[in-house]
Amino acid sequence: MTGPPLPAPDRRRAQLAENLASVRARIDRACVDAGRDPAEVTMVAVTKTYPAGDVVSLAGLGVTDVGENRDQEAAPKAAEVAAAGADVRWHFVGQLQRNKARSVVRYADLVHSVDSVRLAAALGEAADRHRDRPLAALVQVNLDGAADRGGALVDGGDPDREVAAVAAALAGHPRLRLAGVMAVAPLDWAPERAFARLAEVAAGLRADHPDAVVVSAGMSGDLEAAISHGATHVRIGSALLGMRSTLR
């Protein structure tokens, strides 16, 4: 016999717990296959379009890192989560406009998507005014050189968007800390090809900036390939939270 149905909040928490166990098992297996320690890989729960209540539930289940891709959603959600007493590290993982820098620096612990010298400068100026500690940031890398795609360019061509120049801008600002690189696999590339290329870029960056050890790569569908090529952070949305499309 089965008992009475759980109340909706309890059903949601149970669903999140089941999904979290599945994702963690995948990460563990991928690390074993790659000869890596699972402790080297941080799972960032990407909660865009999901309510603050889900973040609070995930925090209660042991999730420490949460990602958002729109400041308009992230800023009030971070405040709501803090008011509920949940303590998480916030990752800004989406494309960031310079005029949102002042808001993002107030709550983000790590910005994954710095792809221009001008954006680095805007973040640095905002951090000077609104933070009492350095803001960690990653250079978002454009892997295929497509002009209409976000990310700093590996092979140059635009001084504002060269990987080395963006990295230098982050490393050179006293209120910013260059932490490493991030990329999204292009849709027409096999994940293995994309993350192998990112690993090369990351190694080149570390030659000049030895402390820039973070590699943010891999999402729900390709986390195994990312881990096999050295990802330290995987950004997990649908595999953890499901396919809902609205906040409430």
Image (cartoon, rainbow, N blue to C red):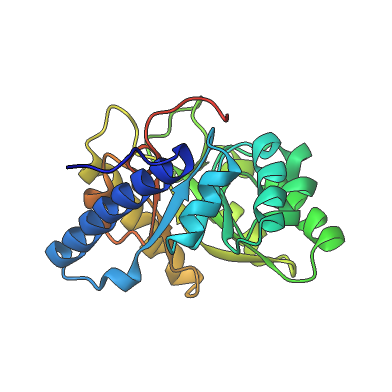
| Quadrant location of the C terminus in the rendered image | top right
**Is the residue 224 above or below the residue 37 in the image?**
above
Question: x, y percentage for residue 120?
Answer: 69, 51
| Foreground of the two, 166 or 113 | 113
| Foreground of the two, 202 or 137 | 137
The residue sitting at the right extreme is 129
- Residue 125 in sight here: yes
**Is the residue 6 above or below the residue 133 in the image?**
above
| Quadrant location of the N terminus in the rendered image | top left
Q: How many marks?
A: 0
Question: x, y percentage for residue 87?
Answer: 60, 64
Question: x, y percentage for residue 71?
Answer: 68, 39
Side of 3 where 52 appears, left or right: right
Side of 126 where 172 appears, left or right: left
Residue 110 appears in which quarter of the rendering? bottom right
Question: x, y percentage for residue 34?
Answer: 16, 64
Residue drawn at (27%, 39%), measured in percent from left and top?
Answer: 221
| Foreground of the two, 96 or 40 | 40
Residue drawn at (37%, 35%), measured in percent from left and top?
Answer: 242
| Foreground of the two, 21 or 184 | 21
Residue drawn at (78%, 38%), measured in percent from left and top?
Answer: 99
